[in-house]
Amino acid sequence: MSTFLLILVMLGAAIVLAGGVAIIGLVSVIQGSNAVTERLEIYANIPEIAQASDGDTRKTKLIRYRLRLNNLLAGLASEKLNLDLASANWPITESEFILIRVWAAIAGFFVGWLVFNSWIAGLGITLIAYLIPGFLLTRAIHKRRSDFQRQLVDVLVLVHGAVSAGYSLLQSLDVVVQEMRSPASEEFRKVRREIGLGLPMSQALYNLHTRMQSDDLYLVVTAININSQVGGSLTTMLAAVTNTIRERVRLFGEIRAVTAMQRYSSYILTLMPVFMVGVLFVLSPGYMQKLFKPGVTLCFPIGAGIFILLGNILVQRLTKIDV
């Protein structure tokens, strides 16, 4: 009976997925295709196709299939997801990321069902498998933005030195691309490419700020835009902005040092009850199992977990000081 249900679920999932793809494809056909977008995608992949024509035809076919798949599932894309993928610098599209989450959830359900022989376990693993890509994306965005924030002062010092030596602002961005490490070099390469494609410098720098979400970078972008509109000495402006951001970084480091004890105390107070429950489960499992039986007693560990989480959030809020 369980095998029959498994086959039915697999058939149902395949039918739903095929129907969704067919509907999205029909909508895309009705709406028509964007010739400019298609040409840009083809031109963007010309180097890879040229390399593949030397002998590796599989790579060319893979690129074509990928373009067709993205065009077919273009209705699933969103501006926020596109921004997140660009901020994390992941070399995949929104449609591919959504497909990864869907297939991970389907695979997680069947793994949980086959391993634990329970559809409830399958649903639990499905939820975990669906959330893991989003968690990894959020973590990659946070790490990349933190690395960029640490490089920002060095970038400004390099730009200030290049401008003082007689370079223009665009030429100083080329120096940053050549001399700095990732992610600063990659992000300013994107800025340089956008300017080369015809975007104004103000818009390209604003796009950089949108990807990195940095208050210090916003200060830099605002100062450059005001200087380009009003005029004045670019070297003096860059020196003043660099000193301001350097002082902000120093003050932020002092604040983190002062609030370090409170922050780590919140971590210890949060993990200590979990650790003690684990130790008691090992020493006296029968005694602890009574606390987690269905009934009124189950409200105590649930309430304790909720209050521990709220206490951790409250302490983190108290120790977060905007500079």
Image (cartoon, rainbow, N blue to C red):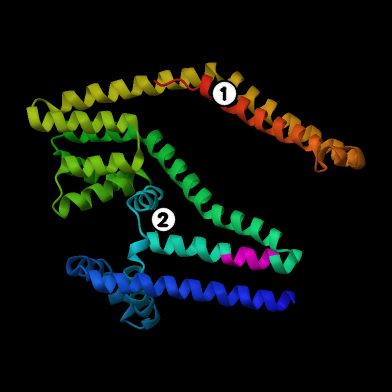
Position of 226 compared to 139: left or right? left
Residue 140 against residue 312 in the figure, above or below: below
Q: Position of residue 175 (x, y in %)?
A: 24, 43
- Residue 225 visible from this viewpoint: yes
Q: Earlier in the sequence, mark 2 or mark 1?
A: 2
- Residue 92 visible from this viewpoint: no
Nearest the eye: 210 or 114: 114
Residue lying at 23% horizontally and 21% vertically, measured from the top left: 240
Q: Depth-wise, is mark 2 or mark 1 nearer the camera?
A: 1
Tag 2 residue: 90
Tag 1 residue: 314
Residue lying at 55% horizontally and 25% vertically, measured from the top left: 316
Nearest the eye: 161 or 233: 233
How far apart marks 2 and 1 lie (CA) works out to 33 Å
Nearest the eye: 86 or 79: 79
Of helix, strand and loop, which one carries label 2?
loop
- Does the magenta segment cover residue 111? yes
Q: Look at label 2 and name its amino acid.
A: Trp
Residue lying at 69% horizontally and 79% vertically, measured from the top left: 4
Q: Residues within 10 Å of mark 1 (few under 14, many from 20)?
A: few
Position of 291 compared to 177: left or right? right
Q: Position of residue 51 (x, y in %)?
A: 31, 75
Q: Position of residue 68 (x, y in %)?
A: 33, 74
| Magenta-highlighted residues | 106-112
User: What mark, if any, has residue 259 been given in the picture?
Assistant: none
The image quadrant where one finds the C terminus is top left
Q: Look at label 1 and name its amino acid.
A: Leu
Of helix, strand and loop, which one carries label 1?
helix
Nearest the eye: 170 or 36: 36
Name the quadrant containing residue 287: top right
